[in-house]
Amino acid sequence: MTTDISVLQKLIDESDNIVFFGGAGVSVESGLADFRSEDGIYNQKYDYPAEEMLSHHFFYTHTDYFYTFHKDKMINLQAQPNAAHKKLAMLEKAGKLKAVITQNIDGLHQMAGSKNVLELHGTVNRNLCMRCKKCYDAAYVKNSDGIPLCSCGGILKPDVVLYGESLDETVIARALYYIKHADMLIVGGTSLTVYPAAGMIDNYQGEKLVLINKTPTLRDHLANYAFYGKIGEIFSQITVR
């Protein structure tokens, strides 16, 4: 294992089929909370555990409270892409990075300019009417009073994967394809504890599995290289060429 950025630079320079697999830690430097750290969403005090409030069952049985939490903690209209988002977009534009696979729902990769983004858990930027399927953006939901409603009167549901719901099989298949064929897999900003998403990296068949995280994970022993620190600060030191 190493923390020498020149090693990461050399790996990127020698690769032309890079895939990035990221989690909540990628967006922390954009001002968004992660989930499992000391100050994370799962450790904040509400009337119900966060895991319960983010469940399919809770959405339908406590829709008003679901949206109180969702608008407060899951939508941040002021968040902007950080150095990690921007550098990944640059790597894609240069033809070196083929896909971003993200567990995040904030849409910051697209805002930074990434085109091929596979959102395993959906996005807060799509909210569908359960009656007519009309789509609304995150700002509409954030600025609504109480439960956001469609112009037809139907209740909106965020296009995110809640607990108790299945991941999109088409998105999974595409993600597995990119991971399997990558010559370099960079895994960043994730504790690798959320399944089935975390298990997807086991499909990587190369010898350049790179982990970038603030702290060690339980799966570091599987990596060929590990870098510890803020992912935005690490990526800001990388030159795209």
Image (spheres, grey):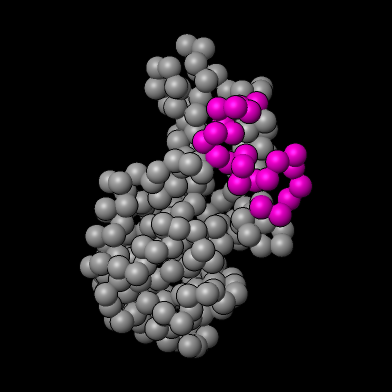
Q: Is residue 162 above or below residue 89?
A: above
Residue 69 % position (x, y):
66, 37
Q: Image point 58% across, 23% down: which residue?
A: 148
Res 234 seen here: no
Residue 36 % position (x, y):
63, 60
Residue 196 % position (x, y):
41, 57
Q: Nearer the viewer, residue 195 or 102?
A: 195
Q: Image point 42% across, 86% down: which residue?
A: 7
Q: Image point 49% across, 47% down: which residue?
A: 105
Res 7 seen here: yes
> How many marks can you see?
0
Q: Of helix, strand and loop, which mostly describes the magenta segment?
A: helix
Q: Nearer the viewer, residue 216 or 101?
A: 216
Say whether residue 127 is magenta.
no
Q: Nearer the viewer, residue 32 or 218?
A: 218
Q: Image point 40% across, 50% down: which residue?
A: 120
Residue 200 % position (x, y):
36, 62
> What is the span of residues highlighted in magenta in the rendered image?
42-64
**Relative horizontal placement of residue 237, taking residue 19 as reference (left or right):** right
Quarter of the figure that contains the C terminus: bottom left
Q: Residue furthest top?
A: 152
Q: Nearer the viewer, residue 169 or 134?
A: 169
Q: Is residue 132 above or below residue 7?
A: above
Say whether residue 48 is magenta.
yes
